[in-house]
Amino acid sequence: MKRLYVWLLIGLLATPILAQDKENEKEKKKSTDYTEAIALVDVWLKAMQSFDELPGISAIAVEDQQVIWEGAYGLANPEKNLAMKPNTICSVCSISKLFTSISIMNLYEEGKLRLDDEIQDVLPDYDLPQQYELSGPITIRNLLTHSSGLPRENAWSHWTEDDIPFPTKEQIMDKLSEQETLYPSSTYFQYSNLAMALLGFIVEEVSGQSYEEYVQQHILSPLELEDTRPYMPENLWGSQLAIGHAMEGLDGEQPQVPFFDGNGVNPAAGFSSTVQDLASFASWQFRLYEADGEEILRPSTLKNMHNIHWMDSDFGTTWGLGFAVYEGPDGKKWVGHGGHCPGYKTSLALIPETKMAYSVFVNSSNANPGKYLRGIQGLIAKASSISTDEEADYIDELKEYAGVYRGNGMGWHSYYGTWGDKLVSIGLPSSNPADGLTTYRRVEKDHFVRIRDNGEDGESLRFIRNDDGEVIQLMSHENYISTKIDF
């Protein structure tokens, strides 16, 4: 009995300590200063837009309910010299699937359908032949996880022929009987735009509303996503809606892509939005994680969507309910989706554990937005490593060294920036800037040494000033000269 009292006493004493630890952790997270990391992001992404010859790129980073950075580079409409902005609209293509999936789960919560309902029971006109006699049923869950065995696309070649418009719902349904399943249900992951389009048709069938009306009423309006639409706004094309560009040809050109309307493919690939709206969309999900009540969905429903519901037998591809779910470069669970439509590529990633989210839009098929998203995330994640010696009296002096330097002779480019009481550098261009981040310790005025991975001193870095005292060059390895340039 005495032992029990001791443990109870320990528990009572530990409770305030644990609570205080949680508060300290929250305070630590709130106090993270991203300013210097964001300076690296800004220079790096500007350089990558130029080096990768992107017409335009917009990006954003959000921590829980706060946007910590947004930026845009290049042009939304090169013919009019119209700048890309964080509120520039692009086709988000397959990110559309997230809104369709949330619509389905909303109807699920209302008891209007079940995840194990068979497709023909909720979509009576469905008549795509099942070629595998022993296949299990194709359910709504299968459609959400891309495990239905359905073909990737509908029967119309709208992706590959410029003169073939995207088909209507009626046209897609009319040709279902001409297609057939690729695999037995619940056998393989097979990404399917057709499956997601059918989910949109199910939303209409079950709700009694048009797909567009349902999404607007139940998701877009409540979240005040004013620049997100379940279609492409033709009246804004070339102004707020960026002009899309095709893959680079052998002539080095990225030709302009004609305006397109997703029609019946809208539930799978027809939405348009901005990185700002997708940041708000991500913040809603983080908010719902901690909510005591329902906001569009119940917290438990969203968390379930973010769990893995399908894994291929090789343990490679994993998928949630509509969401891609995978291990990110930081070893944490990431959820989100990417998109690629004619002339546009987009990416959205959320990290539930840290409540950080990122989105990148490019108005060109000649891009990999995931590369830029991971680069941004990697640099911002480094902000937690910034430290400052309160007794250092040279902090303001460090700003004099910040800038882009071009190597004389070799021609390489590097950016040097402040990092608490130290300097850091990244190479330009760089596919993975966080991995190439180099840190330097101050020895004396204009003299630094690289900090090796083991904490010991490496080679010297010396800055050179002109007669007016302005930093104009640097010398590394006591040999290589680089000149500071405008950028």
Image (cartoon, rainbow, N blue to C red):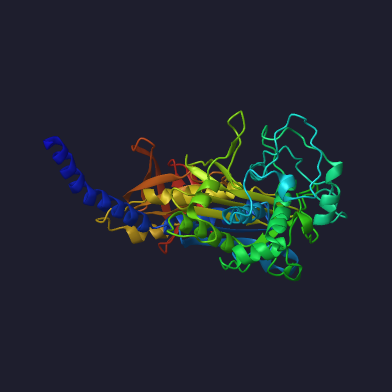
Relative image position of residue 193 (x, y in whole percent) = 73, 47
Q: Is residue 444 visible?
A: yes
- Left or right: where 99 falls relative to 417: right
The quadrant holding residue 168 is bottom right
Relative image position of residue 135 (x, y in whole percent) = 73, 32
Give the quarter of the figure containing the C terminus.
bottom right
Q: Is 272 above or below relative to 422? A: below
At horizontal 59% and vertical 33% (from top left) the residue drawn is 316
Q: Is 450 above or below relative to 255? A: above
- Left or right: where 136 falls relative to 302: right
Q: Is residue 364 visible?
A: no
Q: How many marks?
A: 0
At horizontal 48% and vertical 62% (from top left) the residue drawn is 67
Nearer to us in this view, 91 or 119: 119
Relative image position of residue 457 (x, y in whole percent) = 34, 39
Spot the residue most to the left.
Answer: 2
Q: Is 166 above or below relative to 234? A: above
Relative image position of residue 184 (x, y in whole percent) = 73, 32
At horizontal 60% and vertical 62% (from top left) the residue drawn is 219
At horizontal 44% and vertical 48% (from top left) the residue drawn is 353
Nearer to us in this view, 412 or 101: 101
Nearer to us in this view, 86 or 475: 86
Give the quarter of the figure containing the N terminus.
top left
